[in-house]
Image (spheres, helix red, strand yellow):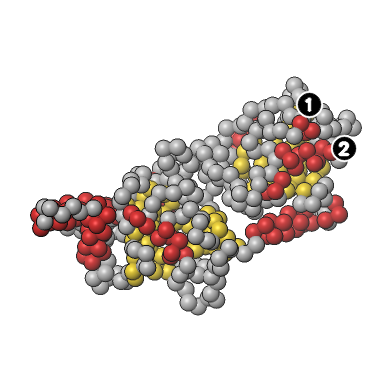
Amino acid sequence: MKYLKLAALLLVVGFTAVSCGESESVSYTDTELKSFEAWMAKYINTDPTNKVATELVNGGYIQWLHRDNSVPEVRPEWGDYVEINYRGMLLSDWDHELEKGSIFMTRWQEDAERLGTFNNYCHYVPQLIIHNLNNYIMPGMQEALQMMKVGDVVRLYLPSGQASVVDGLTFDTSSNSGTGYGGNTTQPSLVPVIIEMELAGVVEQPQTMEERFVIDYAATEWGQTVADSVRQYIFVNIEEETSTDIAGPDSSLTVYYAARLAYDGFLLGTNIDSIAERNNRTASTYFSYTPSSGTDNSDKYLAVQALSEIFETGDITYGSWVEFITTSMFAFGSAGQSPTSTATEILPYQPLVYTIYIDKYGDDDEE
């Protein structure tokens, strides 16, 4: 038998516990932990073909899959942001020889493609979270992170008490399905799991990093300096003008746009049909937009605050193609945006770059 089902172990241990003393009540936690330790002893800690796992302080085990001691150590400090990749699998159907189990969450695109859960709106990059005791990842993952340096990859064997389902991990649940981060199964409660996790990077000052990126982008792409900014960390480049008719802050406009993450150019959304088609997306609908209104009653991808600042300059005319770049402060905020089936996850402190076309509301001159 290649591997033993955890469910069978639970039945054996539970039956034995009741038989030995029918007057004693045995909690599920006790039964699960006995079964979990029996499974670890049988398949991990006594198998000469595998590295023996080390016990974690708060429960569970850690096994090092990759650790490159030839590179300088970079470890996160409390308060740093860390970039992590991970996949979560059920220990109950783990195939020890193939080292595979049913995946219920993943940050790796190759997993999603193999499982058939790939979502074109999903941005498969390491998740950026703050490194502290309240970052909403599983307790066992949190403990392991404190032991890791950048580049390390670990496998965690966690009882359910160290693998509780929490907000913050971007996998499919009943209320957040279709995001592309889910697997071929869901994570049931009160079941041990196996987590493979990579510490991909440490970002000590993400806000400073994005601000510097925006300034450098404007300098490299448009030859602009800080003095050319519309407002600190908002830079505008007018690509083409076809009229002298000013589109002011009180104008009723149609804004055609393509919104991208500035770090790698990933398309967040667009209401331009041709761009949507090239990226296998559905174009958003058109709407009336008045920059001075101060409200976002239009589209979730528009950086409304940045747009308002741009139209205040009085330099934007109807029929213009305009590019602008801004920090998260003037778009979605430093906390980012959670994913849905048709909205890309925006990680914290992500600068955004836009291409927009300005038209009078009701006209249809977009090319």
Three-letter residue code for mark 1: Ser
Three-letter residue code for mark 2: Gly
| Residue at left offset 70%, top offset 60% | 208
Q: Tell me residue 75's x, y (percent).
A: 53, 70
| Residue at left offset 69%, top offset 44% | 331
Find residue 128 and report its image quarter. Answer: bottom right
User: Label 1: which residue?
Assistant: 252
| Residue at left offset 86%, top offset 40% | 313
> Between residues 103 and 111, which one lies in front from this camera angle?
103
Total marks shown come to 2
| On screen, residue 117 above or below 87 | above
Distance of mark 2 from mark 1, alpha carbons?
15 Å
Outermost residue toward the front in this view: 23
Outermost residue toward the right in this view: 244
Find residue 320 and report its image quarter. Answer: top right
Q: Tell me residue 291's x, y (percent).
A: 78, 33
Outermost residue toward the bottom in this view: 70
Q: Residues within 10 Å of mark 2 (few under 14, many from 20)?
A: few
Q: Dividing the image into 4 quarters, which one contains the C terminus?
A: top right
Q: Tell me residue 70's x, y (percent).
A: 50, 78
The label number, if any, that marks residue 26 in the structure image? none
The label number, if any, that marks residue 314 in the structure image? 2
Task: State the SS at label 2.
Answer: loop
Left or right, residue 365 beside residue 114: right
Left or right, residue 9 beside residue 44: left
